[in-house]
Image (cartoon, rainbow, N blue to C red):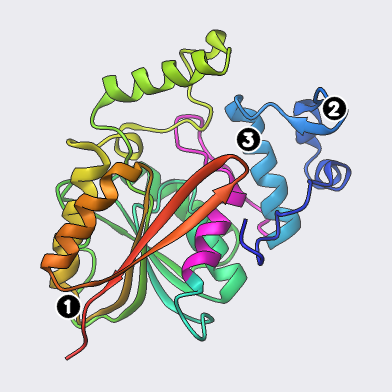
Amino acid sequence: MHLKNRHRDPYDFKALVAAVPDLAGFVVMNEVGTETIDYYRPEAVRALNRALLLTCYGIRFWELPEEFLCPPVPGRADYIHTVADLFQEPRNLRVFDVGVGANCIYPLLGHKEYGWRVVGSDVSKRALKCAQLIIDKNTLSNAITLRHQRDKTKTLTHVLHPAEAFDLTICNPPFHANEEDAQAGTLRKWKNLGRQELAATRNFGGRSNELWYPGGERAFVLKLITESRIFAAQVRWFSTLVSKERNLSVFEKRLALLEAEVRILPLAHGQKKGRIMAWRFPRP
């Protein structure tokens, strides 16, 4: 994890349970006698998120309906700190979150860690309603604002307005191409982990627009790249998570044609490896 990530050390479950008593019901001992939770249970991850957001970031209200994506806080914090390193002075940036989701995690972490002012967009009105409740309950409306993307085929178009300027865009794109692909991927994961009894569940939840997009991650990010060129003069850095390493060469070729500068920023959470792709266009 990033050196600035607050979650590099083992969790203090005593303190976390004291902050969020509901977490106690999900704490178990692993095979080496260390306290942990069952990360394959969405309700356990939600309870842990509430405790981490409260104790580490002062977020006193964070509620998420079961059907929405519940991303682990430490991994999202790593994204924030990693892209912050693109800037000599990362504080008080203006940031655009493509697909903010009901969880509103990136804006919360970006504002609490660096004082970022964030605009988040989403195609789901229900997701935006949930995110807005989190913003309002934590009195963060001056720092985080939301916009509805009415066109599901667009990423930045319609929601990034003319004459606006942003330092950075962030994005966690849909991974799968369709619902069947998402279900098959979940089934393979549970079988590989010996947890066949969970084959009908996703440990982090997620609705359709959060998990799949026609053509999958590749199509979504290529669309984002194409649209980013339109807003080249308004944004200093664009960025996105890239889950499938084999897609990188496709993205880099497209960006080379657009004469963009590209940086691949590695992420590592235990044995899991990931990466962020960041790019920018030459200034006039």
Whether residue 189 sits left or right of residue 114 in the image: it is left
Q: Amino acid at mark 2?
A: Val
Label 1 vs label 2: CA separation? 56 Å
Q: Is residue 34 magenta?
A: no
Residue at the disc numbered 1: 162
Q: Secondary structure at mark 2?
A: loop
Q: Amino acid at mark 3?
A: Val
Point out the frontmost of discs 1 and 2. 2
Point out the frontmost of discs 3 and 2. 2
Check residue 32 in the rendering and tell me which mark sits there, or answer none: 2
| Rendering coords of residue 247 (x, y %) | 26, 45
Q: Secondary structure at mark 1?
A: loop
Check residue 10 in the rendering and tell me which mark sits there, or answer none: none
Residue 158 visible:
no
Quadrant housing the N terminus? bottom right
Q: Residue at x 18, y 35 (%)?
A: 214
Label 1 vs label 3: CA separation? 39 Å
Tell me which numbered mark, 3 or 2, is placed earlier along the sequence.
2
Q: Residue at x 50, y 72 (%)?
A: 84
Label 3 vs label 2: CA separation? 21 Å
- Res 157 quadrant in image: bottom left
Q: Secondary structure at mark 3?
A: helix
Residue 111 visible:
yes
Q: Is residue 131 above or below residue 68?
A: below
Q: Is residue 111 above or below residue 43?
A: below
Tell me which numbered mark, 1 or 3, is placed earlier along the sequence.
3
Range of magenta residues: 59-83
Quadrant housing the C terminus? bottom left
Relative depth, front residue between 21 and 92? 92
Check residue 45 in the rendering and tell me which mark sits there, or answer none: 3
| Rendering coords of residue 281 (x, y %) | 22, 77
Q: Is residue 272 above or below residue 6?
A: above
